[in-house]
């Protein structure tokens, strides 16, 4: 789509674009290029010289059990976060759509967690599940379930999943509710006249109509779980205990900032970039389809 | 046509009653489930707010209070002026300073993004010039590279430019992103061609048209985007963590989590909780007060 | 007050040429209506005059001055848009004043002009309102007002009435006509509505596939259409077209539906047996109850309009004929005796061009 009426001139549009192009160039393309370049180099132990090593960094990463561990952590963490955040949000949105009276009140009460930073959300759950000071943490220990997410990897994973999903529900809720409210009443009425009971109506009419929204949200939630949850993990577990909550993005940080392994970190960045580009491409295909549809 | 008539039977009446009962029940269940949902979302906040009004030893002992205590004023005053820390470390940063830094960062990011996106979207939509599509794609592709992905090389660039430990370093790299540009582009495309034609006939040039027509028409979009971007800016974590080591530039989200040490018993939990409340208050208020624009902005940026 | 002159206007979008050389001279104070079906190029022509499009070739002159390469703002024109294009965030006053402010007129003068135009259009009390608080008719008036305050050399109207309901449209049509006469501003009015065209224009330009099929006064376009397209486009219900062949040494036509009749206005050139198209307007079809020389019309649809009745039917040879009869005549299934008086014929070649009567040498 484009305008048929436009202004003439060449210098002015470039002038208008300049700020964005400069910032994009310096802070996006240069670093991205650096990452790709760096992923083929290796620094010596003193950081004095770099040599070209081809795909060795990538090969090393993919052979590194720690990296493979991070991959499997990411898969578990991301799918758990995405599906629980989507499921709860859809469930609540359906209820809010049903309860016509007070729907706005529930909406207000459910959307504000969107404003809470992932790291803050993590701390709020820390207050609840801390083994010594947290209500639930103490309760679990009290009834004989040894609870300490700082020692138990599985419990740590559970904690970061809950904290990350909790915050994302409101975002999904907003979209699901908007999606539900955009389904034409006449379609639902037609289904009711066809004799479909509410539950059946949901699965045969509403759910398929929400499919585009759900798919879009799935991609957004995965991107969120991959990248935005750095704060959650950093504030709650620092990737531990051991490396049980180290995800890919956390590992990039650890290798680059704490271990100062430039080549490995750059190679990981490149892999992540490829991942995001793939996800964005999928989403873009989907947007295109939605436009035609 | 023949019609079969029959009287309303007792079964019909019973069916009508059962239907009414079922509908009422389903409404009540919906309300109950929603209330439960609201509770789940509110509970962690409740615990935190309540905790921030007790003294440090109450919490430290693990007596999780469910109702307000009497130390609220004292806790907030000391969080605001002194800052909390795990007691081992020195150099606590007072909450007012961290909040001020966060406010600066969030507002500068939001305003900066909106400003450069408005300009670039205007150029892409309302002009035909060589390289237009190239520029559009250069911007669009950045949608695919969140700062987290390219964090280390970007950090190196910042070091080279000497932007470490500065507000500019905190803000400028986050100012360019495709999302806002795409939103404005989409909105500009819905501005009827006739406005441009009318403006041309009225004798308005591109800059005048931008100022007199496009900008006023964009006000709600700008407001919506401001809410989203303010929250985005306020909630930044990894970038400030990396760029800022100077305590005078500490932002509240990062600073608050830094208060939690590893030796648990010594944490000033009450002050930490008060700071957590202060840290989430501004974005939550923005969302609640500007809910209409916020929902609009959110659902439209992602379309 | 000004003249407008278009010569050799061509316009291509990519490979497709949408205007194939338009010639038009508009006299000072004249109201020209450009009419045609959608896609005929009429809007493109208007936009070229406005300066919103540049012609591929040809020149646009306003008052003799070549403005082809000038920006719209430098042409001293005003335009009323189809959807009015009122800036939604500006009040009625600001909308009308905007063009004047850009031109740097003193505020006193702007106020005076807006007040005058507002009075003329009876929108004085609405000046502080925003466009969304106005009805369709009121918006239309504001759009007119915006054009009037500019005191331009040329008014351009781009289907300004098409968004109004039928009743309002008739009213605004009359008002535009009165206003244009009163102000005496040379005007170009684009529409797809033939009634609008007939009632508004001093002259019409009937456009067809990027060409001006006919440029003439409304009555001339109706009475002497240049080709079958114009003949069919102007008039409602549309003109009937019957196939025929030339007979009697060019002196008459043999209708496919029946009789051979001599032309009323003289012979046409051409060999006998040449294919012709005979046009006759529904209102000229006669009902012949006594049956003398009548053709049988098998009626298949009757549309009573009150004072008249529109009858659709088929002639022998299965040709369709529509008749507009001044009485409640005919019923579905009935065979109505109708006459096609040659005095009301329009004679066209098989390709559709009008065939005028040959000037016959006196015997």
Image (spheres, coloured by chain):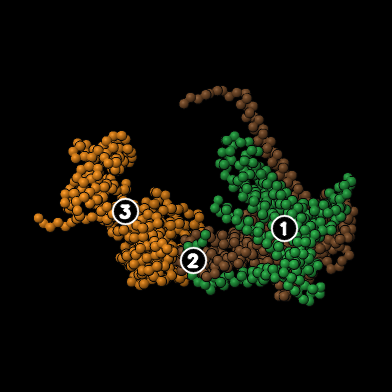
Chain colours: A green, B brown, C orange
Q: Are marks 3 and 2 on the same chain?
A: no
Q: Give neighbour class at mark 1: few <14, some 14-19, many 20+ (Cα, 10 Å).
A: many
Q: Is residue B200 visible?
A: yes
- Dots 2, 1 in contact, CB < 8 A: no
Image coords of residue A176 (percent x, y) = 65, 49
Q: Nearer the viewer, residue A283 or B243?
A: A283
Tag 3, which secondary structure? helix
Tag 2, which secondary structure? loop
At a point 67% along the width and 34% down the height, the residue shown is B22
Q: Which is in the foreground here, disc 2 or disc 1? A: 1
**Residue C118 versus residue C291 in the image, above or below:** below
Marks 3/1: CA distance? 66 Å
Q: Nearer the viewer, residue A43 or C104?
A: A43
Q: Quadrant of residue A291?
A: bottom right
Image coords of residue B223 (percent x, y) = 62, 60
Q: Which residue is mark 3?
A: C229
Q: Which residue is mark 2?
A: A6
Q: Give neighbour class at mark 3: few <14, some 14-19, many 20+ (Cα, 10 Å).
A: some
Is A189 placed left or right of B96 in the picture?
left
Q: Chain of mark 3?
A: C
- Dots 3, 2 in contact, CB < 8 A: no
Marks 2/1: CA distance? 41 Å
Q: Which residue is mark 1?
A: A226
Q: Earlier in the sequence, mark 2 or mark 1?
A: 2
At a point 67% along the width and 52% down the height, the residue shown is A218
Marker disc for residue B124: none
């Amino acid at each position: 789509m484009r305008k048929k009426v436009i202004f003439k001139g060449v210098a002015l549009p470039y002038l208008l674009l300049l700020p964005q192009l400069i910032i994009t160039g310096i802070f996006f393309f240069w670093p991205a290029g650096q990452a790709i370049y760096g992923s083929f180099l290796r620094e010596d132990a003193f950081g004095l010289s770099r040599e070209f090593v081809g795909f060795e960094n990538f090969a090393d990463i993919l052979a590194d059990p720690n990296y493979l561990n991070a991959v499997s952590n990411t898969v578990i963490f991301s799918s758990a976060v995405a599906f629980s955040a989507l499921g709860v949000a859809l469930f609540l949105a359906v209820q809010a759509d049903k309860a016509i009276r007070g729907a706005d009140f529930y909406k207000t009460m459910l959307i504000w967690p969107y404003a809470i930073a992932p790291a803050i959300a993590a701390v709020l759950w820390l207050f609840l599940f801390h083994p010594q000071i947290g209500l639930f943490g103490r309760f679990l220990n009290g009834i004989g379930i040894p609870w300490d997410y700082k020692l138990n990897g599985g419990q740590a994973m559970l904690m970061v999943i809950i904290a990350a999903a909790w915050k994302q529900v409101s975002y999904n809720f907003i979209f699901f509710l908007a999606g539900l409210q955009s389904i034409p009443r006449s379609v639902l009425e037609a289904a009711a006249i066809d004799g479909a009971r509410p539950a059946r109506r949901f699965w045969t009419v509403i759910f398929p109509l929400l499919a585009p929204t759900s798919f879009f949200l799935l991609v957004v939630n995965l991107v969120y779980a991959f990248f935005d949850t750095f704060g959650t993990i950093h504030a709650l577990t620092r990737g531990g205990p051991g490396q049980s909550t180290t995800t890919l993005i956390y590992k990039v940080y650890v290798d680059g900032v704490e271990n100062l392994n430039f080549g490995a970190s750059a190679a990981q960045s490149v892999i992540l970039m490829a991942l995001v580009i793939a996800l964005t491409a999928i989403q873009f295909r989907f947007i295109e389809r939605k436009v035609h549809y | 046509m023949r019609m079969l008539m029959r009287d309303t039977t007792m079964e019909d009446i019973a069916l009508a009653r059962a239907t009414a009962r079922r509908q009422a029940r389903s409404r009540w269940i919906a309300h109950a489930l929603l209330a439960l949902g609201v509770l789940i979302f509110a509970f962690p906040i409740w615990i935190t707010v309540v905790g921030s009004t007790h003294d440090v030893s109450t919490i430290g002992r693990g007596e999780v209070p469910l109702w307000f205590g009497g130390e609220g004023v004292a806790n907030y005053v000391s969080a605001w002026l002194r800052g909390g820390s795990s007691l081992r470390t020195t150099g606590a940063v007072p909450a007012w300073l961290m909040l001020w830094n966060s406010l600066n960062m969030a507002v500068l990011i939001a305003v900066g993004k909106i400003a450069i996106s408005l300009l670039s979207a205007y150029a892409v939509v309302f002009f035909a010039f060589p390289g237009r599509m190239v520029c559009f794609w250069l911007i669009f592709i950045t949608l695919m590279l969140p700062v987290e992905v390219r964090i280390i090389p970007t950090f190196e660039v910042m070091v080279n430019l000497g932007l470490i430990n500065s507000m500019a370093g905190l803000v400028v790299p986050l100012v360019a992103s495709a999302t806002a540009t795409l939103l404005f582009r989409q909105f500009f495309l819905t501005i009827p061609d006739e406005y441009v034609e009318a403006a041309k006939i009225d004798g308005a040039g591109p800059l005048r048209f931008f100022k007199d027509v496009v900008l006023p028409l964009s006000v709600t979009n700008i407001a919506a985007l401001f809410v989203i971007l303010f929250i985005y800016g306020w909630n930044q974590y990894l970038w400030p963590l990396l760029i800022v080591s100077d305590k005078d530039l500490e932002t509240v989200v990062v600073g608050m989590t830094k208060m939690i040490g590893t030796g648990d018993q010594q944490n000033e939990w009450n002050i930490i909780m008060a700071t957590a409340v202060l840290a989430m208050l501004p974005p939550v208020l923005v969302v609640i007060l500007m809910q209409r624009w916020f929902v609009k902005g959110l659902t439209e940026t992602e379309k | 007050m000004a003249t407008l002159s278009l010569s050799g206007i061509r316009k291509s979008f990519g490979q497709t040429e949408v205007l194939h050389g338009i010639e038009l001279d508009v006299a000072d104070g004249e109201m020209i209506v450009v009419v045609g079906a959608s896609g005929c190029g009429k809007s493109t022509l208007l936009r070229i005059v406005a300066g919103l499009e540049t012609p591929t070739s040809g020149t646009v002159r306003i008052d003799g001055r070549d403005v082809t390469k000038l920006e719209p703002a430098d042409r001293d024109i005003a335009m009323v848009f189809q959807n009015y294009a009122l800036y939604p965030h500006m009040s009625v006053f600001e909308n009308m004043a905007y063009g004047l402010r850009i031109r740097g007129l003193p505020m006193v003068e702007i106020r005076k002009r807006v007040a005058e135009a507002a009075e003329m259009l009876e929108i004085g009390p609405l000046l502080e309102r925003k466009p969304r608080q106005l009805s369709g008719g009121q918006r239309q008036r504001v759009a007119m007002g915006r054009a009037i305050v500019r005191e331009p050399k040329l008014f351009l109207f781009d289907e300004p009435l098409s968004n109004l309901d039928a009743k309002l449209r008739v009213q605004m049509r009359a008002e535009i006509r009165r206003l244009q006469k009163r102000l005496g501003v040379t005007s170009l009015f684009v529409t797809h509505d033939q009634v609008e065209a007939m009632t508004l224009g001093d002259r019409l330009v009937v456009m067809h596939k990027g060409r001006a099929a006919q440029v003439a006064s409304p009555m001339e376009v109706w009475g002497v259409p240049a080709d079958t397209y114009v003949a069919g486009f102007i008039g409602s219900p549309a003109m009937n077209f019957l196939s025929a062949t030339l007979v009697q040494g060019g002196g008459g036509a043999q209708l496919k539906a029946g009789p051979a009749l001599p032309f009323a206005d003289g012979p046409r050139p051409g060999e006998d047996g040449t294919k012709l198209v005979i046009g006759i307007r529904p209102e000229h079809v006669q009902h012949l109850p006594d049956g003398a020389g009548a053709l049988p019309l098998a009626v298949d649809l009757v549309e009573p309009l009150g004072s008249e009745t529109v009858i659709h039917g088929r002639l022998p040879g299965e040709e369709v004929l529509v008749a507009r009869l001044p009485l409640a005549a005919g019923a579905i299934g009935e065979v109505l005796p109708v006459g096609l008086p040659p005095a009301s014929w329009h004679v066209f070649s098989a390709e559709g061009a009008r065939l005028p009567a040959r000037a016959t040498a006196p015997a």
